[in-house]
Structure formats: C-alpha cells, structure tokens
Image (cartoon, helix red, strand yellow):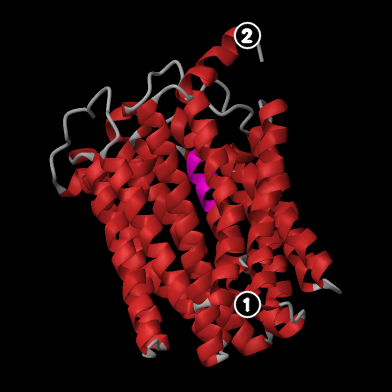
Amino acid sequence: MTPSDSTPEISLWRHPAYIRYLYVRVAASVALQIQVVAVGWQMYALTGSPFRLGLIGLVQFIPAICLFPFTGHVADRFDRRWVTFIAEVAEAAAVAVLAIASLAGHLTPNLLLAMAFVVGIGRAFEQPSVQTVLPNIVSAKVLPNAVAASTSGSQTAVVAGPALGGILVALSPTIVFAVCAVIWVTAGVAMITVKMQRTAATPPPLDVTTLFSGVVFIARHKVVLGAIVLDMLAVLLGSVMALLPIFARDIFVVGPLGFGILRAAPAVGAIVTGLVLARWPVSDRVGRVMFITVTIFGIGTILLGLAPNFIFAIAAMAVIGASDTISVVIRQTMVQLRTPDDMRGRVYAVNSMAVITSNQLGDFRAGAAADFFGTIPAVLIGGICILTVVAISRLIFVELYAADRYDLAKS
C-alpha cells in the first residue's frame, strides 16, 4: 500500500457518520449471532430434535424468498436508514418476546419458531438497505476502505457473537434474549443518526417489471449468475451450522460455551483469510479460484464429519470459514462492480435472498438429513454434495470458470 492509498483509510476514523455506520454493522452482526446461538440451543434443549433445529432455518428462509422483490424496491425508494431502523427494532421486539416468555417459564418450541420467523422478516428488509447505504455516507475516494473496514468489523462480530451467546446462554436464557434485544435497538437508533452526504437516485416506478429487474439483471450476466448459484448451492446442500448444538452437547460434550466456540471458528478462519486477501488479493483467474475454494469448503465439511475430537472439529470449521470467505469476496466484488447505482438495492435484494436462502434452507436440510440418517452421515453426505455441485457447475457455468477478472474487461 502506498502512502496515498493509506490516507483515505486514516480519514475514515475521523468520519462520525461512518463510525456510527460501522457500529450498526458490528452490533447487528453480534445480535444476530447471539440470537442464532440462543434459539438453537434452547430449541435442542427443549426438544432434543435435529429436525426442530432445521425448522429454525426454514422459518427464516420463507420471508427471504417471499419478500425479496419488495425489499429491494423499499431500499431503492425510501430512506435506507429508516428502513434499517424499523427492521432492527422488529428483530429486537422478537427476541424481547422470547426474554419475557423465558422469564415467565413459557418458552416453547413453537414460540421460538414464531419469533425466528419475525427475525427473518426483519433481516429480509434490513440487508439490502444496510448494504447499499454506504455510498451515500462516504465519498467515492474512501469507499473501498470503508467497505473493507465494515466487512472486517462484521467478521469480528461473528467471532465475538457466538462466544458471547454461549456465555449468556449458560448464565440464563432470559438474559441472553434481553441483551440481544438491547443491542439490536441501539444499532437501529445509531442508524437513524447517520448523516448522509448524498441521497439516492430517483426512485424507480413500482411495477412488475422493476420488481423483478434485479433477477433479470443477474440472469443476463452469466458470470455473476454462476457465482451466486455455485455459492448458494454449496451452502444449501452442505451447511452444518444447524447441527453444531448436537456436536457440542452429544458428540464432544463441551456445553454451551463449546457450542459458541464451534460457531465462532468459521469466523476466525474468515478473519485470517481476510487479512491474507488484504495483503495478497485475488486479482486474476478469479473464476478458477472460486471453484477451488468451494472445493476446499466441501473437504472441510467432510473433515468435520470425520473429526476425532473437539480441537479437530474447531480446525475443520476454521477451514470451512476461510474457504467460504474467498468465494464470498469474489461473488460480492463481482456484484458491486457490475451493478448500476440506480438499481443496487434490487440487485442486492436478490443477492441477499440467495445468501439467506442458502443459509436458512441449508439449516433445514441439515436438520432433516440428521434426523433421517444421523448427524455424522448427514455431515459427510453434505460434503460429498458440495464436491458434486462443484463438478456439475464446472460444466454448466463455463463463463464463470473462465473469468479472469472481477469486472467486464476480461470475463
């Protein structure tokens, strides 16, 4: 990095609006991770059912898939700060209900699922808005630095959130849900105090054509389509996150704190990988690199299924997080460089829908497979499915495999 390159990065920390935005990203990520740990642990404690763990992902998937045409439009038509605020307050209200129910002794599996559904609705509206508001906060000169810093902050939160969630769950279910609600509220309040330098472009008309314009845009860009589909299918068919309570409680017997550590391990791998990418970024043959890293993602999943002890399992989860980060960076960079400013919200809504779909529906798939085959066989099958997806995608998405650079100059 040259001295001129470092100057914008330093100026970010003197930018009050960006500092508030960074807090929003970090706090919301921490709250989400705490909620995931708490709901997953309580569901398994109440039911002992892997299938019920999978249902948590299913109920959060439904809003993402049903609402994405509207969430992108909302992000492009209204003040994204207020959209984010309302969404995060709704998420806070959901976990506050769980805190009250826990205190009263009325926490039930059905209530956990219902409030997970509300959180899913909030996230469906939050993600396109919070992801696309940054260009309205900082100048184009410092935007790359701002994106890198906020991404690093979110990954740090993904490490701290599960560990904090594990500690709080061990103390009290009531406390963990209450703390989660407070964090989400503070994130929402911070968001509406962010001062924007520029407003968004003229809102698009609300009609059927523009509702699905994000889908049409991605479908016409085969490299972007391939990157999204490859990443989505790999996580959908191979995700193991919903099964970690079983590993922590029944297989390795390490309790809620161990569960939090397992949840945090992928983010540790992601942070280390992010530091490496900051020093040696992927600049060419990006398509091939993505296929290689998704392959490593599948191998890491298989290693988790074969893990002889808790330490080996932590290492396998770190490999999963590290490889997933590289593919995510490639996918997100492609979307940013190939999306016009005036429809960024709609395109990011589709992208967010794909991410949430793969994560949440992947959790349901994992829980159902574990209930039918057993936990270890389900994990091994998931890893094999990832490798199969890579092989098939290599034949279908030829443009992605041949992509040399992120932008359109050399695709």
Rendering coords of residue 158 (x, y %): 57, 53
| Magenta stretch bounds | 223-230
Majority SS type along the magenta span: helix
Dot 2 or dot 1, earlier in sequence:
2
Q: Quadrant of residue 353?
A: bottom left
Q: Relative to residue 389, is residue 248 depicted above or below?
A: below
In the image, which disc is placed on residue 245? 1
Q: Nearer the viewer, residue 405 or 178?
A: 178
The residue type indicated by label 1 comes to Pro
Q: Nearer the viewer, residue 8 or 322?
A: 8
Q: Is residue 274 left or right of residue 232?
A: right
On the rendered structure, is 375 left or right of 157?
Answer: right
Give the quarter of the figure containing the C terminus: top right
Q: Which mark is residue 3?
A: 2
Q: Which mark is residue 153?
A: none
Task: Reply above or below: 145 against 27.
Answer: above
Label 2, residues with CA under 10 Å away: few <14, some 14-19, many ≥20: few
Q: Secondary structure at mark 2?
A: helix
Percent across and percent down for residue 76 are 24, 39
Q: Is residue 301 above or below residue 253?
A: above
